[in-house]
Amino acid sequence: MLVKKRGYFGKFGGCFVPEVLVPALKELEEAYFSLRKEESFKKELNYYLKNYAGRPTPLYRARNFSRSLGEVKVYLKREDLLHTGAHKLNNTLGQVLLAKKMGKNRIIAETGAGQHGVATATACALLEIECLIYMGEEDVRRQSLNVLRMKTLGAKVKKVKSGSQTLKDAVNEALRDWVTNVKTTFYVLGSVVGPHPYPVMVREFQAVIGREAKKQIIREEKRMPDYLIACVGGGSNSIGLFHPFFKEKTHFIGVEAGGLGLNTTKHAATLVKGKRGILHGALSYLLQDKNGQIRPTYSIAPGLDYPGVGPELSYYKEIKRAKFVSVTDKEALRGFFLLSKTEGIIPALESAHAIAYAKKISSLLQNKLVIINLSGRGDKDMHIIEKYF
């Protein structure tokens, strides 16, 4: 464990919440750290991950894409092939199962790109529990297909019309709901953000990605990869890949949303351009204006459109364990079409940021072994892509 004291990664993390939520978070912490050790809980979760979600996901050698980079050997961790089309189900199955064991009868969640909302609605349908999803009105417009999927699965979707009408505002509304209904409600947070124990808990549910990738690359190549590359919004897919490799000599690269450029305010490059601050119950890097107020963000990829980041990734930045970079919308689009046309795999726009950065640094990657986390598939983004044809 990297947590020196519970809830902290170095100086990042913590639990900065209204007093009314303290008992709920303590109850969650005790339940999680107790149940995670129980064989019956692990067995049931592993059953669903294998037989329902489709784990392990393949580690695919992308030969055509590799050739487009030169003498580089690239493997894709195919989280896009997981049931619901993204890595999010790893976490929601774990949390909703935990909620069931705790006797909670109502689930709430927030979503930006819609994949976490779909995954939460899916887990709730499977485990027969009421589900309400908060989603910014702007994201509802951008991700109408995922909204329809959530409703089809039986979830209620509530539009959030405050602020920038994106992920940050959906989180705010979900937290307000939780404060009001704390006794009966379980909040399924979608990333490694928020107050303790969420960053640790979500990381552990997502670390199945890296544990599998580690076994798979050793089986295929008989050695560790030189580089791991993943997109970063809140950080769950990246930390899920990185964490099991923490003690290895493998380089970590997290790719944030450069939007219209870092010289504008239209981006979401939190670790590249942010400062330390507190958002949604934890200390991490944030995008702030000169008065310390949370700055509006932007990305073509809805899942990266968030002004904060997980405290563990903030710690990785602080100790220089990972390098954090950004690519623009235009670069991400080039990555999107490059992978689609070389491999017949249409990536989510979020994942396309990681693909684009690998192309951008192809000269550095010559004769290297690389794993890119393909965190989701691009079906949800086709109406965004349509106007670029």
Image: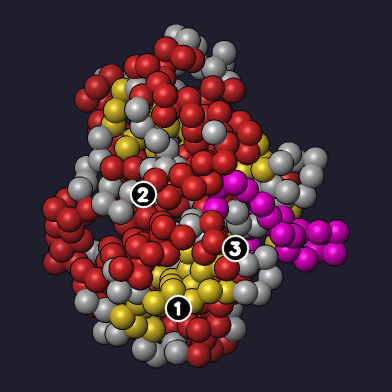
Residue 308 among those drawn in magenta:
no
In the image, residue 38 above or below residue 274: below
Depicted 102 relative to depicted 51: above or below: below
Closer to the N terminus: mark 2 or mark 3? Answer: 2
Residue 321 point in image, percent of width and height: 55, 37
Which one is in front, 313 or 261? Answer: 261
Residue 306 against residue 126 in the figure, above or below? above
Q: Nearer the viewer, mark 2 or mark 1?
A: 2
Location of residue 288 by image quarter:
bottom right
Q: Amino acid at mark 3?
A: Glu
Residue drawn at x 40%, y 70% is 188
For discs 2 and 3, the disc positioned in front in the rendered view:
3
Q: Measure how far apart labels 1 and 3 are at the Cα level.
A: 30 Å
Q: Earlier in the sequence, mark 2 or mark 1?
A: 1
Q: Which residues are magenta?
A: 278-302
Q: Quadrant of the C terminus?
A: top right
Amino acid marked by disc 1: Leu
Marks 2,1: beta carbons within 8 A? no
Residue 359 appears at what percent x and percent y?
54, 22
Tell me the residue that label 1 is attached to. Answer: 25
Image coordinates of residue 385 in percent, x first then y, are 52, 41
Q: Position of residue 129 (x, y in %)?
A: 26, 79
Q: Nearer the viewer, residue 328 or 366?
A: 328
Mark 3 lies on residue: 138
Q: On the picture, is 338 further left or further right than 257?
A: left
Nearest the eye: 322 or 129 = 129
Q: Is residue 280 visible from the viewing direction of this image?
A: no
Q: Is residue 250 left or right of residue 215?
A: right
Q: Residue at x 49, y 33 (%)?
A: 336
What residue sits right under mark 2 in the picture? 86
